[in-house]
Amino acid sequence: MPSLIFISVILFLFFIVNLWFIYKQKVIYKSLWEAKEQARITLYSIGDGVLITDTNGRVTQMNTVAEHLTGWKEQDAHGRPVEEVFNIMHEETGNKVENPIRRVLNEAVVVDLANHTLLVSKDGKEIPIADRASPIKTEQGELSGAVLVFRDQSKERAKQKMLEESEERQRLVLEAANLGTWDLDLVNDKAVRSFRHDQIWGYTEPQSEWGLEIAMRNVVQEDRQMIMKAYEQGIKSGFLIHENRVIWPDKSIHWIRAYGRFIYNNENKPVRVIGIVEDITERKQTEEQLIEQKDLLQTIFDNVPAMITVYDPQISQIILNKTFEKLTGWTNDDVKKNNIMELVYPDPGYRQMVADFMLSLHQGYKDFKMMTRHGQSIETSWANIKIDDGRQVGIGIDITERKMIEQKLISTMTELERSNKDLEKFAYVASHDLQEPIRMIKIYAELLKNRFNEKMSNDEREFFGFITDGAARMSELVNALLQYSRINRSGKEFGAVDCNYVIEEVLDDLKFAIHDSEAVIKKEDLPVIKGDKTMIRLLFQNLIQNAIKFNNNKRPEVAISKELKDGYCLFRIKDNGIGIPAEYYERIFVIFQRLHVRDKYPGTGVGLALCKRIVELHGGRILVESEEGRGSTFSFALPMN
């Protein structure tokens, strides 16, 4: 009986132990299932593609992102070699790239893909990716497979491309605007500049060193104090602007305008100035420049030299830059409480016209009158741009000064045109009417000389020689003046002019001069241009004749070349003659101006003035590059036919 009880107790305990063991197994299985399910959920929820292989490199698992990128369904990819599912190649060469999984399985190390890797999906689509492959190990440290995590980099590549395009646009705009850039380290007085900056300061090659001290040595003495004062004011305001004269290496004087923005350290002390510089010599000389061009493509929004508004339709918010606030008096605080359109365009009808322009995204600029906070009306010109994220950017400039200059210019040009016509008429009439008295002087001087020649002393004969020579020179000058005044009187429409044919005619006219001087004339094949044949012939004849005449070499050489660009032909006539000093580059084109005595180099001083007028009538400009004793090169551009 006791043994039966003992056996019963043992069986009961055995039953309890089994129940406890089964319970624990279920708990463990449940925990494992939950962990596996959690891992599965994590795997399929992650934003990157995940692909898992066994130790043989065959796919065992992949999430939906990996399915989307590779084009393979998990059930189709299961058991396949990873190279078949995850097919990668080099973006630039197109060559296949070693699969990182293989290296992980061989070396048990973490492997990152190199840059410029493309994933070729099942349907052939090429996707730029970045990935990392890692080994999977057991608790004992044994390799059980590999996991590959990869992501699509298409958006990152697109952003990078946009950035590069933006930088290229900035570079092109700076080049188009002919601006030099500079970044001055105030602590060390060292500046980083663009090559255009150095050119504006007169250098033909980039300078190895530059700083404020070096720059000041190149500034006209009288302007140096003004620049230092501008720096002192700029440190307080944060902005630098000054106009001054600089001395180029060739000793010529030029005007520049510099803009800059100060950068401060944590102690609010200026450490850098970043800015641009432009050559404003022509504007200073002619006083015809339009609105001064300020900071261009500045990286900081408030420093751009134009009014800018940014409208975000998603949050109905508009932001104004500092230039807008400065020009109009309206601030960002004002537009938070009021409609900016109602502030600057108080007239409802006019305001609707402006709004229609903004909504139309019209290409180019359109002029509008804006009302400032102080009740003044200013002339502005605006362009609108819609960027990819839906925001609309308005860029506007103040053209009030330009409008005033345009009106003044129209009045000046009208008066100048009237004055030129009167002057041409006077020159024509005067030169024509002077021919007769000069002819009478020459005739009667010859008659007196012939009649009284035997009775005259040597001094008297010399005096008569002076009279006849003077009359001949006067006749020559009058003829030259008459020819000069007629240059603009043809009234003919410009037509096709074969420059090869014109040069042949000119060389035929100058054949005796060419023969006597043993000159060598070389020319390229020249194009057909649009112009007046008579004028073009006179232009080439004067330049070639001067190249032969003003030459001390035993064998003068003249080379005629051309360069075609943007619908124009740039002609160059180069010689090996006596050259022209730089200080006379402008003077030689003034009528009756001579650099040499008549006995050595005869002439009227009209030839180059004629050339200048002919080129300008064809819409071009004639320039000379020369070095005394080493020849000259005259260059001018004429429109192609």
Image: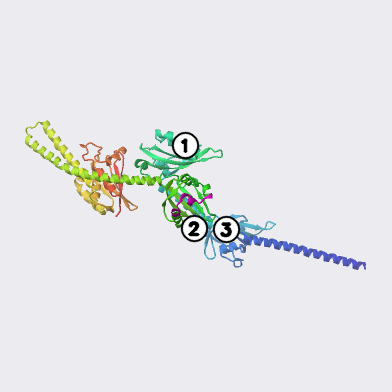
* Rendered location of residue 85, percent (x, y): 57, 64
* Rendered location of residue 452, percent (x, y): 7, 34
Q: Which residue is mark 2?
A: 93
Q: Earlier in the sequence, mark 3 or mark 2?
A: 2
Residue at image point 39% right, 37% down: 245
Near-viewer residue (375 or 45):
375
Residue at image point 85% right, 66% down: 12
- The image quadrant where one finds the N terminus is bottom right
Secondary structure found at label 1: helix
Q: Residues within 10 Å of mark 3 (few under 14, many from 20)?
A: some
- Look at discs 1 and 2 and give the one toward the viewer: 1
Please name the amino acid that badge 3 sits on. Arg
Q: Which residue is mark 1?
A: 231
Which quarter of the figure has residue 585? Answer: top left
Q: Is residue 344 left or right of residue 544?
A: right
Does 343 lie within the magenta span? yes
Please name the amino acid that badge 2 sits on. Thr
Q: Is residue 68 left or right of residue 18?
A: left
Q: Which residue is mark 3?
A: 151
* Rendered location of residue 84, percent (x, y): 56, 64
Please name the amino acid that badge 1 sits on. Tyr
Q: Residues within 10 Å of mark 1 (few under 14, many from 20)?
A: many
- What's the mark number on residue 577? none
Secondary structure found at label 2: loop
Q: Which residues are magenta?
A: 337-351
Q: Earlier in the sequence, mark 3 or mark 1?
A: 3
The main secondary structure of the magenta stretch is helix
Could you tell me if the residues under marks 3 and 1 are in contact, i.e. CB atoms within 8 Å? Answer: no
How is the structure coloured here? rainbow
Residue 547 visible in the snapshot: no
* Rendered location of residue 417, percent (x, y): 28, 46
